[in-house]
Amino acid sequence: MLEFPEHGDRRGQLVIVEGNIDIPFEIKRIFYIYGSDADVVRGQHANLKSEFVLINICGRSKVRVKDGLGNEAVFSLNRPHTGIYLPAMVWKDMYDFSPDSVLLVLSSEHYDPNEYIRNYDQFVETIRKQLHLEERWS
Ligand code: TYD
């Protein structure tokens, strides 16, 4: 989880997120998700290359992250100055959106559908192959 400083004064709050300073990559793309019902599950993919930071700038949601090796963790995104950093090659599900949820996503890459893995079994297989290759070369 990342905590961004709040630069608040009598006029309200200001949160600054600078690429390569507050988050560990240069920002090439932003998108945001809103209007998702509470029973919707979004994401459901892993990325070969893209790293992401997710910030619920309004409302709340949850993200479940899986490493493909049996480990998973759930994070609550419920404050406009708190984000989660997701490296490449993790499986992510976003869900439990509040009606007022606006989920801002910062990405290290431009959109390329070919670097999305949308099949969980294929994700696990790719993770295993990567680990196998690393073991062979270490
Ligand atoms: P999708 O990846 O399913 O959204 P999420 O992971 O947030 O649930 O994307 C929905 C559609 O939008 C899909 O057709 C791909 C397209 N899209 C782009 O064209 N560019 C983008 O940067 C993103 C995130 C999605």
Image (cartoon, rainbow, N blue to C red):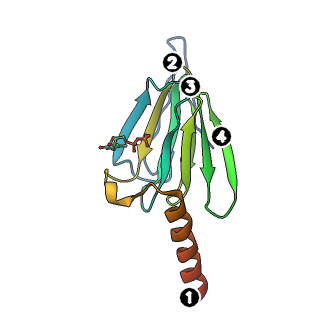
Mark number displayed over residue 75: 4
Pinpoint residue 77: horizontal percent, then vertical percent: 60, 33
Q: Earlier in the sequence, mark 1 or mark 3?
A: 3
Which mark is in front, 3 or 4? 3
Rendered image: mark on residue 100:
2
Ranked by sequence position, the earlier of labels 2 and 1 is 2
Q: Amino acid at mark 3?
A: Ala
Q: Nearer the viewer, mark 3 or mark 2?
A: 3
**Residue bearing mark 3:** 38
How many C-alpha atoms fall within 10 Å of the one at disc 4: few (<14), some, or many (≥20)?
some
Q: CA distance from mark 3 to mark 2?
A: 10 Å
Across and down, in percent, residue 138 comes to 60, 87
Gap between marks 1 and 3, in whole Å?
45 Å
The type of residue carrying mark 2 is Asp
The part of the image, by quadrant, that contains residue 97 is top right
Which secondary structure lies at badge 4? strand
Looking at marks 3 and 4 on the same chain, the residue that comes earlier in the sequence is marked by 3
Dot 3 or dot 2: first in sequence order is: 3
Callout 1–callout 3 Cβ contact below 8 Å? no
* Quarter of the rendering containing residue 64: top right
Disc 3 and disc 4 in contact, CB within 8 angstroms: no
Q: In the rendered structure, are the residues bearing label 1 and label 4 in contact, judged by CB atoms less than 8 Å apart?
A: no
Q: Earlier in the sequence, mark 2 or mark 4?
A: 4
- The residue tagged 1 is 137
Report how far apart the C-alphas of labels 2 and 4 lie in the structure.
18 Å
What's the amino acid at mark 1?
Trp
Which quadrant contains ligand 1? Answer: top left
Residue 102, can we see it? yes
